[in-house]
Amino acid sequence: MPQLAISFADVLAAADRLHGVARRTPVLTCDALDERTGAQVFFKAENLQRVGAFKFRGAYNALSRLTPQQREHGVIAFSSGNHAQAVALAARLLNMPAVLVMPHDAPAIKLAATREHLRGLRGSEIVLYDRYTEDRAAIGARLAAERGLTSIPPFDHPDVMAGQGTAALEMIEQAGPLDALLVCVGGGGLISGCAVAATHLLPEIAVHGVEPEAGNDTQRSLKAGHIVQIGVPQTIADGAQTTSSGLLTFPVIQALVRSVVTVTDAQLVRTMQHLAQHLKLVVEPTGCLAAAALLEGVLDLRGQRVGVILSGGNVDLIQYSQFLSGTGGSATLPDPHGGALGALIKDAP
Amino acid sequence: MPQLAISFADVLAAADRLHGVARRTPVLTCDALDERTGAQVFFKAENLQRVGAFKFRGAYNALSRLTPQQREHGVIAFSSGNHAQAVALAARLLNMPAVLVMPHDAPAIKLAATREHLRGLRGSEIVLYDRYTEDRAAIGARLAAERGLTSIPPFDHPDVMAGQGTAALEMIEQAGPLDALLVCVGGGGLISGCAVAATHLLPEIAVHGVEPEAGNDTQRSLKAGHIVQIGVPQTIADGAQTTSSGLLTFPVIQALVRSVVTVTDAQLVRTMQHLAQHLKLVVEPTGCLAAAALLEGVLDLRGQRVGVILSGGNVDLIQYSQFLSGTGGSATLPDPHGGALGALIKDAP
């Protein structure tokens, strides 16, 4: 087996750094959903994490590992989504400058939340760019060079991966032994960290990844035996609109993940409804991926103790209300590629 | 001071009975809501309690106190709301017959959930009545007499009150000392139990009750010095559509509650939106009462450590989606007395 980018010790060290900073999010159970699936299901509510998503774990862990000189200059990140908010809050807590390069048409609510975290933080700003006419990589490279900023990627970084892995570490402490663990897959930061933690603690556990059907690059990569790149997938799971796994995350997925399955947008919408009705939780489309695979019967894990990570809850309320009022079939779904939902479709985080 | 119906010892005993049966629901905090209110706010998420509301605490405590003979015959309760589900689940767990007398036009989702809890439970049934033409008291009296059933009232009962008080007991264990505690008020079961627990543990704490503006019977009763009866209030807070406090709960409120304030339906809707956006929680209108008083500035508790009980999360998803998509002003509210929302208006629980 090739040397993987992180080990269990890295996850443990991340947990130490996050202690008292990240929330120890609750694990919830629900008789109705157990009955529906025939399994004993434990939901890790990372939608209740700071900034509303697991992303805070990786961002804070990465920023807290920087040298004093790096902290002095600050960090830069590209994201229209939860990673931006996570880096902004982590920078604030660690008192270092942060530059967030975000598309000018990012959801207003995420721009506002990111701006709020950066308020009054020395040397910090949001740099908006036009994703249709400008090259964000060039913008970022120029800024990083000019200001000596350290780039914090959203998933393909050992400290980010180790930080995300603390979600699984905590969950197993809270729920006890699990037969299976279901995790959403975008770039693979969350699932790679979680797979390292879970398979170390429970060597027999089956870790399954779940992708949107339209964005099954990791599933295809596993089949091909190498990283497959796809176009930006059209799905309401905006946090999983990545075009490929990472160079560091993919080998971990290859080594430690049992399977990657896919779910449709219609299945995500029904799952959003189930989680609101039965768990009383607001979960964003991407956050429903893992749960959907189980609740919609894509994976049959009858009789097993199953951990499910609900990865985030950041969704525009108007869009969310449209998802809840749909009757669940794709025919009644709001058009995911137009109208009010257009704002959900954004570049890969 | 007159002898109150319950003491702190009763709440402690209830906590023992509920240990490992009721959920120890999480207490959540949120920087954005702290900033909005100027207070340090601790939200007790009883919407994550079994059956989706605090009502399970009181119902289970009351049923577990019955004699073997009473258990053999079973219990009867009248409710179209959360109390019905709570009694049904408690009866199932304690294996005793339960008869729930519910209006034929109760929300389908609550009928279904109650029926599910009773499935296969000996001697159990839902008795539907027409609230416009039939007298539920007479129906209940006849059934109770015929079958020797013990009636479990929704709030005016010492064991119910003591059970509800465990919510405050837990919260103070979880959050530490509080300067103030905000609790919704319907018949007064939750606030009376919580006031007994909180003022025993923290003699200086200010316990505030919150009622819907249209249903301010307790506020008026406190002013009058005796229980005032009102007509069924028209409010989206269906769990607080009570017409008066109880004979047992009112003296506790008189003795231990600092003030009772009111909020409007429009304020409840905006609070539902805030709690979805910032806490990622689905909270029903009644469950938003206490939070609304703080978030809408009815109570100014700047600089204080404030506990807020989010009492429940059982709301029809279609109605909930309408609340979320409103812009918050009363002008844009769906008509609470007609259309799809008509089903929310029901008899007192």
Image (cartoon, coloured by chain):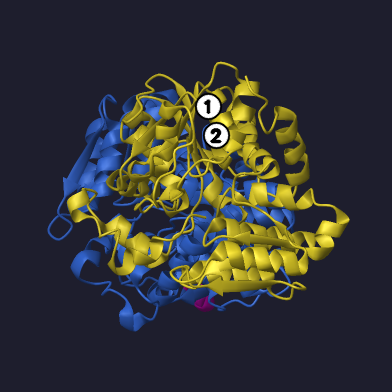
Chain colours: A yellow, B blue
Distance from Cα at disc 1 to Cα at disc 2: 6 Å
Outermost residue to the right: A68
Q: What residue is shown with label 1?
A: A254
The spot of residue A51 in percent (x, y) is 59, 58
The spot of residue A342 in percent (x, y) is 34, 65
Q: What residue is shown with label 2?
A: A250
B213 and A55: which is toward the camera: A55
Outermost residue to the top: A204
- Disc assigned to residue A189: none
Residue at coordinates 48% horizontally, 59% vertically from top-left? B188
Mark 2 surroundings: few (<14), some (14-19) or many (≥20) residues within 10 A: many
Task: Classify residue B71 as left or right of residue A131.
Answer: left
Q: What secondary structure is marked by label 2?
A: helix
Whether residue B301 is situated above or below residue B347 in the rendered picture: below
Give, as a single range, the part of the protein colored magenta. B221-226
- Residue contact at pointers 1 and 2, CB within 8 angstroms: yes
Q: Is residue A114 magenta?
A: no
The spot of residue A316 in percent (x, y) is 42, 64
Image quarter of residue B342? bottom left
Task: Classify residue A232 as left or right of residue A23.
Answer: left
